[in-house]
Image: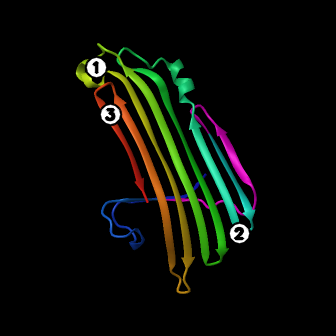
Amino acid sequence: DVVSHFNLYPAAFDAEFGDVLGGIIDVQQKQPRTDRTGGHININTALTDVLVETPITQDQGISFSTRRSYLELILPHLGIDNDNFQFIQYPVYMDYQGKYVNYINPDHTLNIIINGARDTLTFNIPEGSDNALKQPETMGIGDIKLGFDSQGIIWQWDTPLGHQNRLALGKLVINNQTSFGDGILFQGKNTFT
């Protein structure tokens, strides 16, 4: 409910995407409502998600959505642990998206966007298991923590000749930590502005 359109350009794409090689995935967020308050709550067997959007004025709106899994409550009852792999913390994921829009005038729009996500999982590869015998360095506790947070501001304006311009500033912080037993550790924090 927060995506206005999704396009995949595998090779031939417009000049607006610049001088790049490869394919492009173009995902654009829906603008928040400025006419009335709305939203939804969805609860299903794997997760719950919530979306709320509301006008601030007739020219401004805000939306926020989040979702969170509760697989850690369901998976223990499915008996998926075995002699080779045991969960300590079952997979948990959550994400959030927020957007503010201000239609300054018919030719100028300002958007402020926030996004983020977290994924975690902890497991054990027991000593003597097939996995530990094949790759001894992975034996023991494994821990995966992945996440990112981003913020951006986009000013869009239309020219009298019908061209559309955008000025965007943003920041993206990616945090990753993955370990397997005593032998393998990947850890990184990257910041892009």
Query: Disc 3 to disc 2, how far (Cα)?
Result: 49 Å
Q: Secondary structure at mark 1?
A: helix
Q: Looking at the image, which is closer to me, 88 or 23?
A: 88
For mark 3, does the 10 Å Cα neighbourhood hold few (<14), some (14 to 19), or many (20 or more) residues?
Answer: few
Which residue is drawn at the image coordinates 35% and 18% (left, top)?
Answer: 84
Give amino acid for label 1. Answer: Ala
Is residue 34 rendered magenta in the image? yes
Q: Looking at the image, which is closer to me, 76 or 8?
A: 76
Residue of label 1: 132
| 123 versus 167 height, above or below | above
Q: Looking at the image, which is closer to me, 48 or 186?
A: 186
Which residue is drawn at the image coordinates 51% and 44% (left, top)?
Answer: 117
Residue of label 3: 185
Query: Which segment is the magenta one?
Result: 27-48
Q: Secondary structure at mark 2?
A: loop
First reached walking from the N terminus: tag 3 or tag 1: 1
- Give the percent coordinates (x, y) of residue 126: 34, 16
First reached walking from the N terminus: tag 3 or tag 2: 2
Q: Quadrant of the C terminus?
A: bottom left
Residue of label 2: 59
- Give the percent coordinates (x, y) of residue 6: 49, 57
For mark 1, does the 10 Å Cα neighbourhood hold few (<14), some (14 to 19), or many (20 or more) residues?
Answer: some
Q: Quadrant of residue 100?
A: bottom right
- Give the percent coordinates (x, y) of residue 66: 60, 45
Is residue 128 rendered magenta in the image? no
